[in-house]
Image (spheres, rainbow, N blue to C red):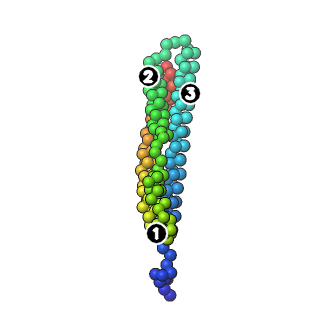
Amino acid sequence: MRFCRSRSTQRPAGPTLVRLFEAELAAAVASRDSLLTRATGVIMTSGALAAVFLGFAGLVSDGQGVATPLLPLWLLGLAVAAFVIASGFAFAVLWPRPSLSVGLETLQKYTDEKLTTAPAHFLEQRLTPSLFTRIEDARTANDRLATLIAVGFGAEIIGMLLASVGVLTLIAG
């Protein structure tokens, strides 16, 4: 039994490639949305942690009626700076960027009468490189955004450690 059909009855691969590229592009867009959500979380968490730690330090130091040692104040100040840095990197992720959609010039080319009346497989051959370029650009942009978020997370962790040590030093002091 032979599984290979004659060339005249085989379906072209174009539609399958286009579907694959569309799925990859959709995955890249979903990944970008997830990165934007994480950036918002870093901003909210950093702000809340800075407020909580500074509020706690204010309660502990003011309630004693004794001068607060410098080390905890420096640690808490550095923690707040780390939280601000974390938020700064997260804001860089949320900063508006140019769209990764197909440019107007490219879309204009696809409105040519020769293309609109051409067989579908011919148009799929023309669209595939554009889809690939969009996927490549989206992945590159997502890699940059992920790096910014990773640095923001790192700064947030450093801020939490500094604030924790600062508060513990206040309590123990």
- Coordinates of residue 38 in the picture (x, y in percent): 52, 42
- CA gap, disc 1 and disc 2: 67 Å
Label 1 or label 2, whichever lies nearer to me, is 1
On screen, residue 89 above or below 51: below
Label 1 or label 3, whichever lies nearer to me, is 1
User: Pointer 1: what residue?
Assistant: 122
State the residue at coordinates (49%, 60%). Answer: 111
Helix, strand or loop at mark 2: helix
Residue 86 visible in image: no
State the residue at coordinates (50%, 48%). Answer: 32
Residue 105 visible in image: yes
The residue nearer to you, when weighing 62 against 86, is 86
User: Pointer 3: what residue?
Assistant: 52
- Coordinates of residue 28 in the picture (x, y in percent): 49, 53
The residue nearer to you, when weighing 45 against 14, is 14
Q: Earlier in the sequence, mark 2 or mark 3?
A: 3
Residue type at mark 2? Trp
